[in-house]
Amino acid sequence: MALASPPRSTSSRGLGMDTFSPLKTTPAAHRTGGLDVTLSVNGRDHHLTLDPRVTLLDALREHLGLTGSKKGCDQGQCGACTVHVDGERHLACLTLAASAEGKSITTIEGLAPEEGSLHPMQQAFMDHDAFQCGYCTPGQIMSAVACIREGHARTDDDIREYMSGNLCRCAAYPNIVAAIKQARDQMEGARG
Ligand code: FES
Ligand code: FES
């Protein structure tokens, strides 16, 4: 007897949710022709033709080869995809690439002030062993820099609260807090 195919989940049945899966947007781009989009990433303009549904994360990783921003959950729950858009932290997996046109996007690849150097936050993560597998680390670092700029890194509790959107399955949390405090002092010292 042939096995029946597994039932579709009730959450997606009838809602057409499959259509909106970001994982399926890239093939659709080839079918529909796409939208011309210019993305300014790490100080460089990139002209792309994308399906309007392509996320910023897929545009960065699949179209520009910038794989530093990680795809953890692809649904806004882990923070691994965090990038800066006009200096503010955004989840690239929940941001449409087309909506980022005309804005300044910074990824982990463009965070350091110059090629071959490290941003104080990157150095602090190394100094404090603030990672194990490293998968969450680019998102942690991008979020941590924004957290300091927002003024949300005054206390350990503050840091834990405002970094709570960035999950680390290796549980390097105490070291991450220590790294952020070191970088905070350097960044604020540099600002004078
Ligand atoms: S991949 Fe974007 S929040 Fe998890
Ligand atoms: S270092 Fe492994 S998930 Fe954070």
Image (cartoon, helix red, strand yellow):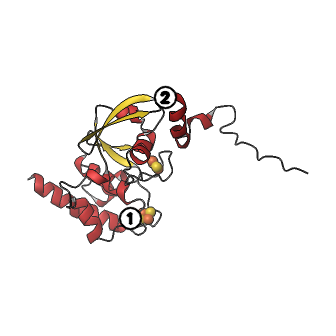
As drawn, which residue projects farthest toward the right?
1
Mark linked to residue 71: none
How many marks on residues?
2
Name the spot of residue 184 as percent of width and height, x first.
Answer: 21, 58
Left or right, 1 with respect to 113, comes to: right
Query: Which amino acid is tagged 1?
Result: Tyr
At mark 1, the secondary structure is helix
Distance between the Cα atoms at labels 2 and 1?
A: 44 Å
Residue in the image at 38% along x and 49% along y? 65
Q: Earlier in the sequence, mark 2 or mark 1?
A: 2
Identified at 50% across, 45% down, the residue is: 75
Q: Is residue 95 above or below residue 142?
A: above
- Rendered position, 176 above or below 40: below
Q: Residue 173 bears which disc, if any?
A: 1
Check disc 2 and give the amino acid type: Gly
Question: Could you tell me residue 114's position as x and y percent?
Answer: 18, 55
Q: Position of residue 95 (x, y in %)?
A: 42, 38
Q: Which mark is residue 33?
A: 2
